[in-house]
Image: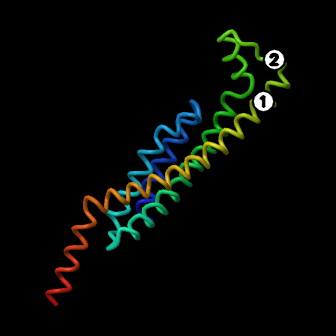
Amino acid sequence: MKKSALIVGGIAFIFSAVLTLVSPFLLPCITPFLGISAGYITGLFEPSYTKKDAIKMASKAAAFAGLGMLVGQVFGAVMNGLLVGPDGAALVLESFGMPAGPPEQMANIYWLTLTLSTACISLFNIALMAALGALGGLLWWQFSGKENLDKSEISENVE
């Protein structure tokens, strides 16, 4: 569980830090792939002999990998705030022909939106990764776990 959580968590950190620089709303697009792969990789590194254990371990590993995504998203949001800032967001709005409003109001709205979107999307991503990690563990069980169970029963009967 630790290996797969660290591997997928590191990948999630990098992806989330980069994508948050563009927009934090892009992160839920990669979350399903990361969650399922964390669950499946957990089964590869630590095979279990029951379907329930496989799903439970995979879900935990994906949730811990989601923490890596959370850290990357916070890092990306801080970098976005420093690089773009309220002035850059006002320029983007004006380039689309939308009024930006007074600078003080724009700064308050920018920081509030950045903070709330990071918090909400991070929590959503952790929950989604845990749920899809369980799916990845179930997929591993369907493809490979049953074979491990059959082999263990054969080895117990031989002895």
Q: How many labels does the image show?
A: 2
Left or right of residue 74, residue 146 in this image: left
Viewer-nearest residue: 30 or 7: 30
According to the picture, the residue beneath numbered tag 2 turns out to be 101
Task: Please report whichever mark, 2 or 1, sits nearer to the chain's N-terminal start.
Answer: 2
> From the viewer's perspective, is residue 137 above or below residue 157?
above
- Residue 36's spot in the image, x, y percent? 40, 51
Q: Do the residues labelled 2 and 1 touch (CB within 8 Å)?
A: yes
Report crowding for label 2: few under 14, some 14 to 19, many 20 or more residues within 10 A (C-alpha). Answer: few
Give the structural element (helix, strand or loop) at label 2.
Answer: loop
Left or right of residue 115, residue 48 in this image: left
- Residue 10's spot in the image, x, y percent? 47, 52
Residue at position x 54%, y 49% from top?
Answer: 69
- Residue 133's spot in the image, x, y percent? 44, 55
Q: Distance between the residues labelled 2 and 1?
A: 10 Å
Residue at position x 49%, y 51% from top?
Answer: 129
> From the viewer's perspective, is residue 124 above or below residue 1?
above
Query: Disc 2 residue type?
Result: Gly
- Residue 83's spot in the image, x, y percent? 66, 30
Dividing the picture into quarters, in which one does residue 147 lie?
A: bottom left
Residue at position x 58%, y 36% from top?
Answer: 20
Viewer-nearest residue: 78 or 127: 127
| The disc label shown at residue 109, or none | 1
Report crowding for label 1: few under 14, some 14 to 19, many 20 or more residues within 10 A (C-alpha). Answer: few
> From the viewer's perspective, is residue 145 above or below residue 28?
below
